[in-house]
Structures are given as structure tokens and as C-alpha cells.
Image (spheres, grey):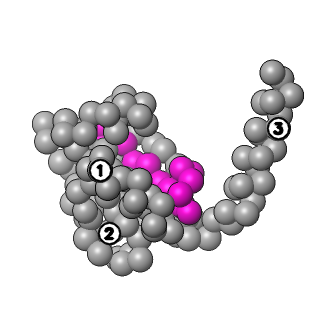
Amino acid sequence: MASVEIHEPEFSDIIDNNSIVLLDFWAEWCGPCKAYGPVYERVSEEFPDVVFGKIDTEAEPMLAKSFNVRSIPTTVAFKDGIGVFMQPGALPEDALRDLVAKLTELDMDEVRAEMETQKAAQEEKE
């Protein structure tokens, strides 16, 4: 599946209703974003079961702010509705493919258990 433009109204539905979602925060004026775009698009074609979303930070400043995006491009990944990866800068094509493979293999039961452990530790400190 080719990448899709994501806007705030449908953002939550896309995250909640797809197993793996990658997001590319970008802007038209950004040189590295323009270089990363074709790479992101090529890799998106190889993984039809993964949503590759593009969020224009100029059109959706509140989404960018909610992720504390400070430089673009920034790639964010969700699995089963949980944010599991965020990295500023353009990823090399092989690294993006590798990220998708790792997301596919990621055991979300382990992730949820780790989140519970961290939450309990934080509550103990308070």
C-alpha cells in the first residue's frame, strides 16, 4: 500500500484500527524530507499490511506538537495502538525495512508487561 496523508480527524482511528502504523512527519520546505519521501514511498509498497502515514507538520501543527517533533523528518511507529519507536532524521532504506521487520516480530505482551512494570515503579516514587 502506498503512503497516505494523515490529518488529525482520522489520526486516532488509523492508530487504533491497524496493527502496524508508521508515521513520517515532514514539510514541503524541508530538503531532507524531500530526499526521504521517495525512500519511504518505495518501502511502503513492499509492506501492504502496514500503514505508512505522512503528516505534514505545516498542515497539522497540533499533531506534530503532540509528538514533540522538533526536527523533520521524524519517523514514529505504532504497534497495536502503542507507540514503540520514534527517531528524528531520515532513515536509510535498509533501516526502514529492518524497522518494519522488527515491528512485525515485536512481542506486544512483553511491551505491555514492561509498561506495567514502569508504571508501578513510577507510582512507588510518588
Q: Residue furthest top?
A: 126
Q: Which residue is mark 2?
A: 44
Which residues lie in the magenta part? 72-84
Q: Quadrant of the N terminus?
A: bottom left
Kindly identify the residue that appears in the image at 56 percent across and 70 percent down. 104
Kindly identify the residue that appears in the image at 19 percent across and 36 percent down. 58
Q: Position of residue 42 (x, y in %)?
A: 27, 68
Q: CA distance from mark 1 to mark 3?
A: 33 Å
Q: CA distance from mark 2 to mark 3?
A: 37 Å
Mark 2 or mark 3: whose residue is earlier in sequence: 2
Q: How many marks?
A: 3
Q: Amino acid at mark 1?
A: Pro
Q: Nearer the viewer, mark 2 or mark 1?
A: 1
Q: Which residue is mark 1?
A: 9
* Residue 78 in view: yes
Q: For residue 18, what is the image quadrant?
A: bottom left
The answer to whether residue 79 is magenta is yes
Kindly identify the residue that appears in the image at 41 percent across and 53 percent down. 12
In the figure, is residue 109 to the left or right of 45? right
Kindly identify the residue that appears in the image at 32 percent across and 55 percent down. 10
Near-viewer residue (81 or 72): 81
Q: What secondary structure is marked by label 2?
A: helix
The answer to whether residue 116 is magenta is no
Q: Amino acid at mark 2?
A: Ser
Q: Residues within 10 Å of mark 2 (few under 14, many from 20)?
A: many
Q: What secondary structure is marked by label 3?
A: helix
Q: What secondary structure is marked by label 1?
A: helix
Q: Residue furthest right?
A: 124
Q: CA distance from mark 2 to mark 1?
A: 22 Å
Magenta span: chief secondary structure: strand
Q: Which residue is mark 3?
A: 120
